[in-house]
Image (spheres, coloured by chain):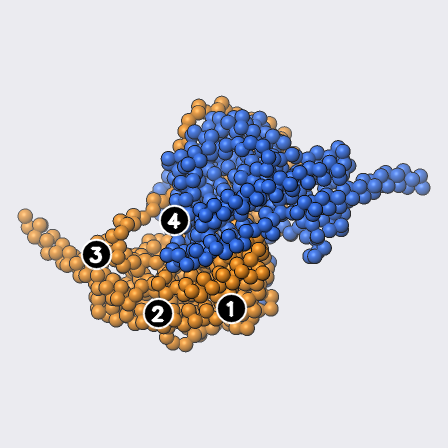
Chain colours: A blue, B orange
Amino acid sequence: MLDVSQLQLDDSSTTPIYRQIANWLTLRIQNGELGMAGRLPATRELAGLLKVNRATVSAAYALLEESGLIEGHVGRGSFAIRPISPAPPAQTLDWSTVLPATQPAEAAPALGSIRINFGSSRPNGQAFPLPAIRECARQVLDGPEASEVLQLGSSYGYGPLRRYLLEGAGNEGIARPNDEVMVTNGCQQALDLVSRVFSSISGGVALEDPSYHGLLRVFSRQNLPIWPIPVTAEGLDLAALEETLVRHRPRLLVVTPSFQNPTGATLPLSSRKRLLKIAESYGVVVVENDIYSQLRYTGEAIPSLKQLDATGNVILLRSYSKIAFPGLRVGWVIAPREMISRLAEEKHTADLHSDQLSQAVLLRFAQSGELARHLEQTCQAGAERLKTAFEACQRYLPTRAKFTRPEGGMSLWIELPAPLRTDAVLERSRELGVDFLPGRTFSLSNSHQRAFRLCFGGLAPDCIETGFRLIGEAITAELASHEARKFVEPAMALV
Amino acid sequence: MLDVSQLQLDDSSTTPIYRQIANWLTLRIQNGELGMAGRLPATRELAGLLKVNRATVSAAYALLEESGLIEGHVGRGSFAIRPISPAPPAQTLDWSTVLPATQPAEAAPALGSIRINFGSSRPNGQAFPLPAIRECARQVLDGPEASEVLQLGSSYGYGPLRRYLLEGAGNEGIARPNDEVMVTNGCQQALDLVSRVFSSISGGVALEDPSYHGLLRVFSRQNLPIWPIPVTAEGLDLAALEETLVRHRPRLLVVTPSFQNPTGATLPLSSRKRLLKIAESYGVVVVENDIYSQLRYTGEAIPSLKQLDATGNVILLRSYSKIAFPGLRVGWVIAPREMISRLAEEKHTADLHSDQLSQAVLLRFAQSGELARHLEQTCQAGAERLKTAFEACQRYLPTRAKFTRPEGGMSLWIELPAPLRTDAVLERSRELGVDFLPGRTFSLSNSHQRAFRLCFGGLAPDCIETGFRLIGEAITAELASHEARKFVEPAMALV
């Protein structure tokens, strides 16, 4: 029999009462205290004993039922421990019975059929400074730190790299006195770890719409409300943000203020200041995804949110992936100590720590001045690519098409005029050997059906020019087929 | 007003009905379809409209309330969309209001006070073959693959390493025809990704007791029942396993058959066969954590569960961390294609892919024969360390202490006789400069209060000898204080 006097419910806990009850009952059942096929008290009865609402008990029982511990009828309020049943006959495991159902993956174009791929936001591999990276690797493995680099490390990251990053951030006015740094496997892992820490944050999370698909994937895994905030050519729509904050009170906002992926949009200085005011007013934690800002090809640099912030509620994410080598998985987070310590706990659970050879090699690459040299060349090449892309937009896109005009980064966002739809244009483009990601990929509601993202950062100017020309051909063919359909339909009706 | 005729409940879905209702309502509220401060139907009313139990609706509303979307009274069944409230006054963010509460970290000994650390299951860094690893890194960065290694890669892992691992596993009779391989950031990430894929597996997960603390951390993050199965000197207790399977029907079992961490216990061949029969009978997915089996110092090798398995329900986890360099984060999973494809989806969300420089360097290290050479030396050194540890156990531990007698791996499990308790001995040992992890670290229920783990793998024989001697002194002092207390107490009572 269940002795409920042992159960201490804690109103001040962040764990809801029904979950406290479920956790306690799980232990009782697990310890065999209810017998092999015992019954649980009826929901009404347990509610009375615990002095809670019956529905709270129902919610606790629903959790236990979901985990297969008990079975019964929620409506009737009567539940039993799952009884012993005979072993099923031996068989080869049918994985579909144990794996949760997922959406089927999107059909990809046939391998080898794509000659020009605007689909991936990555740097130009042909420009990688191989001699410099070779020399950095040699120095690391010849140096006194070699054994330490190969040995088990810290969840916070490789010490010398962390010191270098935090000092640099201090000198730039980015790191505040209470800030700490943690190394991650690129920005993707930083986003994933943030989502783990905030998996039950009150009010959910506000994300840009459109948003980088990897960011949508991370937050849609969590059982959190997601509030999409439109991104205009001038970055996040702050009026829409404020409306969402007033109505739904999300406590977390993820924003990419510079050269946003996918739109390339950049938030002007005045808007950054206003965004911080808004975040401060509503007590919102701001995650600043800042992996593109150093890829500025024209115009003036704008301070990051983290630099402008006076209240300490900005979490800054940076990475070497876009400015150097995505194959070396090294990014980092700068945030108040309290936050970094939670992230480090999650990091420890997720994979102990990041690879140390790459951390040590990239530290040498940065310290030696080779990173700055490489970045300068990348920005020169980027300026040329961007110019080629703009000219190609004007030459090959329909006059009513819209496209963003970023001053850096890796991608452009194009919106086609009606009746064109991206999926049809994409199908024709792939037949011509050109691939890109359709706009719907960057939303959770399958919107942006006329939009698409073109990543120009990793492609040579002649590839960009040819790619746009072929997309232009695909658009022309698609428009012609629309005209043909218009013409055919009335003729059919006459029969 | 809510038009519930649009809501299609799917009985066959793995998503419970109450969650389907909650998801649908979230979207309606998010889209503003219920107005800025609208009300939800009473639980009874909505239950009637949807033809479900009222408690199912209550559970759905409880979820919405938890995410801050609605507020009301579960008991009364009346709920309203959270109304607009004025912005709170500006303030510096108090992180404790947004970060979920966690348990305070265990107090660690003062930095620098520990001379001999038995606490970490890691290899001896002084034996790392630096010239060989230098040469491998040089070859990778001088070779034709250098740019590919530095560029964005695949969630499945670096192609040439995957082919090498899968071919090797095929030759060893480990990989079955339907199997695939995926690279992870060491075994820790493999465990974390497995837990993500199975975060809602029916019946929960069975884990060894005691178990590696990193494994406990991974699974206790998920909202899953965890069933501890005792580990004896002969490995997992199969009778206890079967009883748990009969009673609770967990569909997932994580087991370390060779040189288990922390006990060092190894499952004999006959038990492995029986374990597979049991797993087959109950349709259980077996995760085989096999990162120590190559560290065998004496005795005959035993085939892995994956080698013995005929039904395809074993997921094999391996890693270069224990047999080579933990600072290079490279492990891998071999499992049926269906499972690997789910793991790769989670990997893609978690951090895109593993670091490619380390993957390419370790591939060369393995292919060149240097790994085999290093492993041979590691096993020779391990045999000496193990012998030293056994002799020290006999010399310095109380006669009634028990200790495991592994034939390899990195750790010993010691159980002290009453009245000794590990925490008291640990405190005294730390004062003498020796650290280790207490038994309770390896359980979720704070058990194993008289046990502790000693990792000998990374320590030189004279360190092992000295460390045991000092622990022996700590034990002697602790026993003396018990005697003194016994003596003092009656004396005090006479006053």
Q: Is residue A106 left or right of residue A153?
A: right
Residues behind callouts 3 and 4 on a single chain:
no
Separation (CA) of disc 4 from disc 1: 31 Å
In the image, B271 versus A280, the foreground residue is A280
Identify whether B114 is placed above or below A307. Answer: below
Residue A34: image location, x then y, percent? 40, 53
Residues behind callouts 4 and 1 on a single chain:
no
- Tell me where residue B133 sits by quadrant: bottom left
Residue B131: image location, x then y, percent? 42, 65
**Label 2: how many Cα within 10 Å (few below 14, some 14–19, many 20+):** many
Q: Disc 2 marks which amino acid? A: Gly
* Chain that bears disc 2: B
Residue shown at the point (53%, 66%) measured from the top left: B165
Separation (CA) of disc 3 from disc 4: 28 Å
Q: Are marks 3 and 4 in contact (CB under 8 Å)?
A: no
Q: Which of the two marks, 3 or 4, is nearer to us in this view?
A: 4
Q: Residue furthest right?
A: A495
Q: Which of the two marks, 1 or 3, is nearer to us in this view?
A: 1
Q: Mark 1 points at which residue?
A: B367
Q: Disc 1 marks which amino acid? A: Gln
Q: Do the residues labelled 2 and 4 touch (CB within 8 Å)?
A: no
**SS for callout 1:** helix
Q: Disc 4 marks which amino acid? A: Gly
**SS for callout 2:** helix
Q: Disc 3 marks which amino acid? A: Leu
